[in-house]
Amino acid sequence: MRYIDVIARVGSIRKAADELAITSTALNRRVLGIEDELGVPIFDRTPGGVRLSAAGEIFIHHVRNQLSDLQRVRSQIADLTGERRGHISIVCGQSMMNSFVPEMISAYRAEHPAVTFEVRVCNRHEVEAELVSYAADIAIIFEPQIVGDFYCVIEVPQNIQLLFGAGHPFDGEKTVRLSDCANYPMALPTRANGIRHLLERAAVRHSVDLPMNIESDSQTLLLRSLREHDTITFQLPIGLEPLTAAGTVSHCQLDTRDVPEGRLMVGHLKGRNLPVASARFLEQMAGELHARFAKDAV
């Protein structure tokens, strides 16, 4: 099952063999044996690698479900010894990587050093697919696009913050209207980002043009543009502190009459029983978010 999972993830038997430290010939024989047993091909072979067939899509869901259940059982058994073990996979938005998720991981591993983590950045459109495929146990995303497979454990509000270089005309302001922001060049995240989603909805509603000079998924590039190109950009409160700590970047709140607060949501695949380590880590994150935003947490 693990072999099939890795092949499906990397899209190549050769690359999967390298990762699994076996020969590609031996791995291919394993795949052919399973396909012979099932009576259908799991993978369609292409010049560029392999991709799951229609039957393979069904089979990989079973495989990942079984691997998840096995991980959960291992975590429960490890808990009997008093030492929590396990592996926790997380997908999150870029803002959560600034400080919140690293801080949560450090705090958890201080108590449970045997637990390992995998953290990947994803956008609001990718959340459910990551959870449904068992590629991630937990998601923490701002304004996720949800169809129905996401179970929200906690939801907290986030007011969009405006970022600008020190000495900008907005310096000293507490709140700024979106129409005033339109007088300055903007460095914006891509449309897959929840902040951009809220900004564009508000711009249409209030007939405001967003003068975008730079568009990028890279937060580093957006922040650098504040200093080098005198642009403005936007951020969430949860990701703000590390960006403004040096004093070279200032911030104020975007007026909620123009851009209402958005939802930062934490959860997992609906109906899934998480491994013990993941479930406890999720509880820790939810508790911290509730403590920070207690008056408005859902």
Image (tube, grey):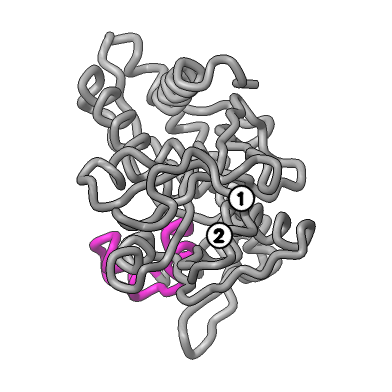
Q: Position of residue 191 (x, y in %)?
A: 60, 65
Q: Which residue lies under the disc numbered 1?
A: 177
Q: Which range of residues does the magenta coloring cover?
A: 3-27
The answer to whether 87 is drawn above or below residue 196 in the figure is above
Indicate whether residue 6 is drawn in magenta.
yes
- SS of the residue under disc 2: helix
Q: Magenta span has 17?
A: yes
Disc 1 vs disc 2: Cβ atoms closer than 8 Å? yes
Task: Report the residue at 55% width, 59% height from top.
Answer: 181
What amino acid does circle 1 point to? Arg
Res. 141 in view: no
Q: Is residue 258 left or right of residue 297?
A: right
Q: Tell me if residue 102 comes above or below residue 290 in the rendering.
A: below
In the rendered image, which residue does mark 2 sit on?
A: 181
Q: From where the camera sits, is residue 175 visible?
A: yes
Q: Position of residue 53 (x, y in %)?
A: 65, 70
At a point 44% along the width and 25% down the height, the residue shown is 285
Label 2 crowd (10 A; few <14 / some 14-19 / many >=20): some
Q: In the figure, residue 118 lies in which quadrant? A: top left
